[in-house]
Amino acid sequence: MACKNTELFRGAGEAYLATLDASTKLPNSNFRPLGNTPLFTVNTSQDFEEVRESKTGNQQLIGYVSNSADTEVSLELNSFSKKNLEVAFYGTGSDVTSGSAVGEAHTVYALNEGIILDNVKVTNVVVKDNLSATLTVDVDYTVDLLTGVITFIDGTNITIPESITVDYDYAAQTKVEAFKNGQSEYAIKFIGKNIHDGKASKVSLYRVVLSASETLDLISDTTVTLAITGRALLDCNENIMDIVNEV
């Protein structure tokens, strides 16, 4: 006999985010998918006032009244896109088109230590000493073309310290300057399905203030995430969250 009145839920889908207008508190952009999101939770906590009787002296509980309720949102994002990094670190992002650097100046203070170029994914690297003489790769220095790190090696013809210039080409890249912006408010939606029954599900959070990501794991033995938390607030229509499930 089939079970009745049992409705289980396990969600699968995408999280979407839109920026709210600072004045109207309404979305001023379309909802942007945040990419693979291994965790999206809403946690509610309440503060209660206990009311106890005074007649018997036993202080028995006669009332339990909610004084406040807070709704916290937690997200973990796999996508380290420019837009997600802007949100996670209150940042301003920019696109850098491919181009060339001419005469980028550096100083060699020690051998076998890295000189880090201003750009990554470099090609056609030409290094010159302080007399504008061209130095030789793998004789005077090595270069990591992916990261743009130049290392002067034992046997080089330069003296220490030495001023050098570097010409090179670089690939297109993105840049996010962290903490260039103040706190923003967002609307966040979960759009997906209940994998137990395949029915559609949508959860809308109308006004959320997000905190900056507390941790940026740059070296790890596992795939890392951008972990972001925030608080859901009442919007201008006095809504915090709606949950819509297909019948």
Image: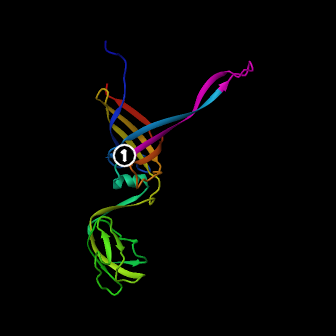
Which amino acid type is marked by label 1?
A: Leu
Residue at horizontal 37 percent and vertical 35 percent from the top:
203
Relative height, residue 236 to residue 181 (above, below): above
Q: Nearer the viewer, residue 215 or 189?
A: 215
| Element type at mark 1 | strand
Tell me the quadrant of the picture where the N terminus can be found: top left
Residue at horizontal 37 percent and vertical 46 percent from the top:
77
Relative height, residue 203 to residue 137 (above, below): above
Residue at horizontal 34 percent and vertical 56 percent from the top:
82
Whole-percent x and y of residue 218?
Answer: 40, 55
Q: Nearer the viewer, residue 198 or 159?
A: 159
Whole-percent x and y of residue 184?
Answer: 44, 51
Task: Tell me the residue that label 1 is attached to.
Answer: 17
Range of magenta residues = 51-77
Whole-percent x and y of residue 73?
Answer: 45, 41
Q: Is residue 247 left or right of residue 57?
A: left
Tell me the quadrant of the picture where the C terminus can be found: top left
Whole-percent x and y of residue 109?
Answer: 43, 77
Q: In the current view of this chain or complex, which residue is farthest to the bottom?
A: 131
Image quadrant where residue 139 sits: bottom left
Q: Is residue 123 visible?
A: yes
Q: Is residue 26 visible?
A: no
Q: Is residue 96 left or right of residue 49?
A: left
**SS majority, magenta:** strand
Q: Nearer the viewer, residue 144 or 44?
A: 144
Asked if residue 125 lies in the magenta stretch, the reply is: no
